[in-house]
Amino acid sequence: MSAARKAARILTLLLMISGVTLFVRAQEARRQAALQARSNAVKEARAKAQTQVQAAKADIESDRAAAEKGLQGEAAALAQEIVRRVLQPAGAGR
Amino acid sequence: MSSARNALRIFVLSLMIGGATRLVRAQEKPSAPDQNQSDSHVQQATPGRQLAHGSREAAGEEKDEMEQFKHSASVGLISKWTKLNLQQSYWLSIVLNFAVIAGIIVWAGRKYLPGIFRDRTAAIQKAMQEAQKASAEARQKLAEIEARLQRLDVEIGMMRDAAEKEGGAEEARIQAAAQDDARKIVASAEQEIAAAAKAARRQLTAHAADLAVGLAQKQIRVDAATDQALVRNFAGQLGSATEKSGKDGN
């Protein structure tokens, strides 16, 4: 094998090795980007869920307050029923 | 091979020692009587004269030595045996001496040299074979390296494809894990909302009960007759319940 062919082969080999190195670096960069995207997605989902939970709790609280107001009217009828049930054995309902 | 070589070396060394001994003896004999005279002459003379004197002495010594050999007993004996004169006997002795030494050298050479040369040839052939073998192995290794180099681009391509596939799979895994995490977060939020609603419902029920009971307490007016009627009714209910439980026990 002549020296020129050897040199050409070595040069080709070096080019291949540098190409592989670049490819591996690019792949590592892609992997890091995917991991970062995963982290961002999880963070975003967590924040969104927290917001939804807060909003749902606020809705529940307002619904509860509204329901308590509505119970004022029903409570009187309920109290009448309790009184009737309690005094029924004595035969004296009020 | 080594023993033959050692024997030849010892033989040559002994010949050289013998020759040197003879030469030293021949030089010592004539110079001994007039050593004092020559010393006094040398001390007085210049270096050029000393050199000329030395060369003359050496020539005289050689001449004396040859004369001594010519007139030695062995030459005389040969002259007597062969009926030759002293000069012819001297040369015959020289020739015989040379022939004996040459014969010994030829005999030793014939005896030991072929073996030595044979061994040397075998060693050279063995070394050549080893060199050829090493050269063949080196060529084979070179061919293997060449083949690997030629396959290397294919192997690198395969490695690259495999790495790309693994990278894609890893990316898909990461995305799936992210979706799973998001699903878990949503489920947790839903559970939290459901728990809050349940608690609110419980509080509302309790509030409604408290409110109704409070209103009922305010509305109830119990006089003595009603109280007695209630106690009687309660005692009657209690007695019937005791009788019923006694019958069930029997």
Image (cartoon, rainbow, N blue to C red):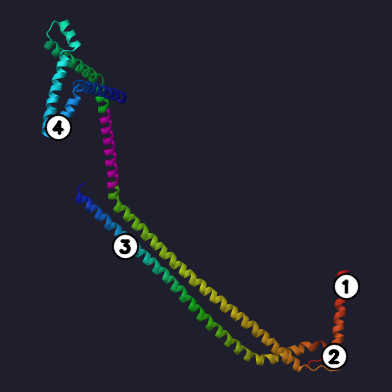
Subunit of label 3? A
Closer to the eye: label 2 or 4: 4
Relative to B101, B48 lies left or right: left
| Kind of element beneath mark 1 | helix
Q: Considering only vertical position in the picture, is B243 above or below A60?
A: above
Q: Please, is residue B129 above or below residue B9 in the view?
A: below
* Magenta highlight range: B122-146
Q: Report how far apart the C-alphas of labels 3 and 4 lie in the structure.
A: 97 Å
Query: Which residue occupies 29% across, 43% down?
Result: B141
Residue A8 is tagged as: none
Residue at 37% in and 67% down: A30
In-front residue for pair A53/A82: A53
Q: Earlier in the sequence, mark 2 or mark 1?
A: 2
Q: Answer with mark 2 or mark 4, whichever residue precedes in sequence.
A: 4
Task: Residue at 41% x, 65% y: name it.
Answer: B171
* Residue B99 pos. (x, y %): 18, 15
Q: Is residue B137 magenta?
A: yes
Q: Do marks 3 and 2 share a subunit?
A: no
The mark closer to the camera, 4 or 1, is: 4
Residue A50 picture location, percent across and down: 51, 79
Q: Which residue is mark 1?
A: B246
> Which residue in the protein does label 2 denote?
B227
The C terminus of chain A lies in which quarter of the figure?
bottom right
Residue B66 vs residue A90: left or right? left
Q: Which residue occupies the foreground of this view, A36 or B206?
A: A36
Q: Which corner quadrant of the image does residue B131 belong to?
A: top left
Check disc 2 and give the amino acid type. Asp
- Check if mark 2 and mark 4 are on a common chain: yes
Q: Which residue is mark 3?
A: A22
Callout 2–callout 1 Cβ contact below 8 Å: no
Residue under numbered circle 4: B44
